[in-house]
Image (cartoon, rainbow, N blue to C red):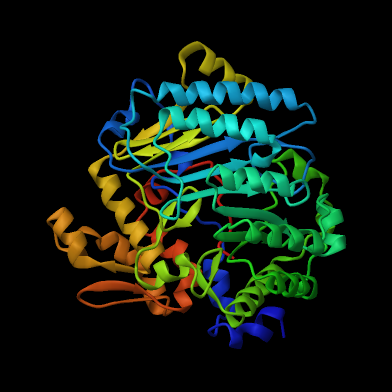
Amino acid sequence: MSMVQEIKTNVGGLSEALLSRYSGPCPRYTSYPTADRFSALDGVRPWAALQDIRSLSLYVHIPFCRSLCYFCACNKVITQQYGLASSYLDHLLQEAQWYRDKVARVPVTQLHLGGGTPTFLNDADLRRLMEGLGEVFELNPGDGVEYSIEADPRTLEPETLDTLRELGFNRLSLGIQDFDAEVQRSINRICSADQVGALTAAARERGFASISYDLIYGLPQQNLDTLQRTLDRVLALQPDRIALYHYAHLPHRFKAQRLIDTDLIPPAAEKIAMQLAAVEHLVRAGYAFLGMDHFARSGDELAIAADTGRLQRNFQGYTLMPADALVGLGASAISYSRSGFWQNLHRLKEYARAIGERGYAACRGWLLSEEDRLRQRVISELMCRLRLDKGEVERCMGTPFAEYFHEELERLQPMFDDGLIYQNDKAIVVTEQGRWFVRNVASAFDSYLHNQPTQAQYSRVL
């Protein structure tokens, strides 16, 4: 009997046959169309719609890290030369100024600093960043908005937590990945549970409203037992939210992953078993499984939003702070308005050159059609609410649902047959078992995925 068979009765009866049909690569749908579809702007200006908004989300990409983690697939720069970060910040704030006359002065309901390691910036530059953003955007920190930052617990000092709270940050995301010593050595990221626990306690003492841990399964040297021990240590620290990601080994795309011994990576069946066991363990401990990789403690705002149908999704994953538009600042950052998407140049030198020459660094994007917006809404409803109201969709398109989406319903038929979804006259509903495969359900409505080939390599569902 395989590992999957041993535990399947505890996770809703998922069979190996079911897993083999649906656990392959599939888009994550942080956007629709997905970013691999973006093309050269060629005069298209999707940011024009930024004047017609009532709320705004900001994303700031800080790509610097002090050391290399072998598993990482982020847009990053490994350096000990702080001058690079200071110079980069100059360009980033110049880019922010470019938006001064292009975006309506509306409240920023969500601000996220990602990376790399945003806390690579020293306290003085964190203040300089927030002051510069405040000159252009309406920053009003408080309980009614979400200001979050990703941090490396190996290097984050309590004094920086004081600075972050002073600047209005109320949510902290700590990259842990795994607590097992052998796993940590194999990915070059050594960090003890005691270190994370002390930092978590310090953040709570300073009033951070929510603390999230990032974990990864499928790492080299990892197995069911080591992952179980990591989860036990995590649960003892009681983070408010947990993201449990699948490690995708793509060394041809990410050079750092070439440093990983592939013989130490667990086989596919064991990785599936790890995720199934981890989800069961977290749910038993009182965490709501929001879908895909995300969990929240009962009583957390995200868990409540999921229960009440208010969950939203953007490039940072699930959120409850929806905004009319997103402005992304920094190398490779993606922005969004009702008109469409635009993405910045990826490499730092190219990004800096573009900012210096023209004030902005957007190089590719997508202008949304009405058809795109319809499918965007359908995919969002399925992924966030696990339910699609046929009547609402029919009112948008003026055509009977079954007639308009007859090809999509054909694609969904195997999932109906397998009990992952069901439908009646009013709605299509994702079942409890179907939560595991909501990306597959959503992909049935992705017209580009089925009609236009792509070179993109999507992560696996399980």
Q: Residue at x 55, y 30 (%)?
A: 330
Kindly give the residue lying farthest to the bottom in the view shown: 9
Q: Position of residue 460 (x, y in %)?
A: 58, 59
Q: Nearer the viewer, residue 78 or 435?
A: 78
Using the image, determine if residue 199 lies above or below residue 338. Answer: below
Question: Is residue 368 found left or right of 440 in the rendered image?
Answer: left
Question: Is residue 121 found left or right of 139 in the rendered image?
Answer: right
Using the image, determine if residue 129 lies above or below residue 182. Answer: above
Kindly give the residue lying farthest to the left in the view shown: 398
Q: Position of residue 135 (x, y in %)?
A: 44, 27
Kindly give the residue lying farthest to the top in the view shown: 357
Q: Residue at x 40, y 43 (%)?
A: 452
- Tell me the quarter of the picture where residue 320 sits: bottom left
Q: Nearer the viewer, residue 406 or 420?
A: 420
Q: Nearer the viewer, residue 326 or 69?
A: 326
Q: Position of residue 192 (x, y in %)?
A: 82, 60
Quadrant (top left, top right, bottom left, bottom right) of the C terminus: bottom right
- Tell me the quarter of the picture where residue 178 sits: bottom right
Question: Is residue 79 found left or right of 326 in the rendered image?
Answer: right
Q: Residue at x 60, y 86 (%)?
A: 10
Q: Position of residue 69 (x, y in %)?
A: 77, 46
Using the image, determine if residue 438 lies above or below residue 74. Answer: below
- Tell me the quarter of the picture where residue 58 sits: top left
Question: Can residue 117 be seen from the camera position used here?
Answer: no
Question: Can residue 189 be seen from the camera position used here?
Answer: yes
Q: Nearer the viewer, residue 252 or 9?
A: 9
Q: Residue at x 74, y 27 (%)?
A: 82
Question: Is residue 451 found left or right of 400 in the rendered image?
Answer: right
